[in-house]
Amino acid sequence: MEVTVVGCSGSFAGPDSAASSYLVRAEHEGRTWAVVLDLGNGALGALQRHLDPADVDAVLLSHLHVDHCVDVCGLYVLLTYHPSSPGPRRADRLPVHGPAGAGEQLARAYGDATPEALQRVLAFPTLTDRVPVVVGPFTITPVRVEHPVEAYGFRVEAGGRTLAYTGDTDSCPALTDLMTGADLVLADSAFVDGRDEATGIHLSGSRAARAAVAAGGVGRLVLTHLPAWNDPEVCRSQAAGVWPGVVELAEPGATYTV
């Protein structure tokens, strides 16, 4: 698998990065398959640097906060009204897997009272905890995590390799199932120890590292979802006090081979 950071800014688009979005690609049956994990504000623009969005095979939304999903509205526009095509740019509807009510919430964000317009080009299958989604070579297992709204991390498996993406979460037992044996973990690190005291919302660098150590068998730990107001080196330092290896920071455009 190749994992590309489309956007990694936490909570809102920052000056150097779109909000959360990750492109995962793999070769299978003679072509490149592509799934997008989250599509937050600003991410659709950045995604076009890496591929034509019409070639995406599926989008998976970890939860329905705007910094993870709102650019699906722009994707609908691109797939519907691009002048190169007299109709929708895809012969099939693009599946956008998300929590219950994703179609309705995105329709409201777009400005329609119902999801009927979006459903002309997008399908909205509902995610279920621990029920895998299969897309080409990818088996993607949503794991319910700890956040104020219904939220999932994604365990993405292909070719015997594993990516774990936490989405937004605080520490919770589910992170062990999500992370165990993962070759690469993309971990929420929005909070800073000693500054952010709220619980049930986000990980800090140290809590992300602690979860990865407890899970066991994690190859690489990459901190992501850092808001623009965070000092990334503080987050890295707090994780480094727990993680035995090198703590990496996500950067827009970075690609990891998993």
Image (cartoon, rainbow, N blue to C red):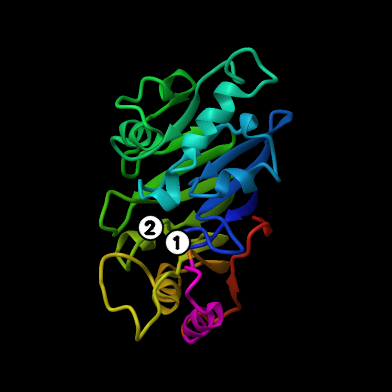
The reply to whether the magenta stretch includes residue 5 is no
Q: Residue furthest top?
A: 86
Badge 1 amino acid: Thr
Depicted 81 relative to depicted 242: above or below = above
Gap between marks 1 and 2 measured at Cα: 6 Å
Q: Position of residue 111 (x, y in %)?
A: 37, 32
Q: Position of residue 188 (x, y in %)?
A: 44, 65
Decide which of 121, 113 is in the foreground and name it: 113
What segment carries the magenta color? Answer: 226-241
Badge 2 amino acid: Asp
Q: Position of residue 45 (x, y in %)?
A: 62, 45
Q: How would you rate the neighbour count of disc 2 (Cα within 10 Å): few for under 14, some for 14-19, many for 20 or more?
A: some
Quadrant where the C terminus sits is: bottom right
Decide which of 255, 243 is in the foreground and name it: 255
- Contact, mark 1 vs mark 2 (Cβ under 8 Å): yes
Report helix, strand or loop for mark 1: loop
Q: Which residue carries the number 1 mark?
A: 180
Q: How would you rate the neighbour count of disc 1 (Cα within 10 Å): few for under 14, some for 14-19, many for 20 or more?
A: many
Depicted 157 relative to depicted 89: above or below = below
The reply to whether the magenta stretch includes residue 238 is yes
Report helix, strand or loop for mark 2: helix
Left or right, 124 with respect to 250, comes to left
Q: Which residue carries the number 2 mark?
A: 177
| Residue under the image location 69 percent in, 39 percent down | 51
Q: Position of residue 14 (x, y in %)?
A: 54, 63
Left or right, 10 with respect to 220, comes to left
| Residue under the image location 29 percent in, 58 percent down | 147
Q: Residue furthest right?
A: 30
The picture quadrant where one finds residue 219 is bottom right
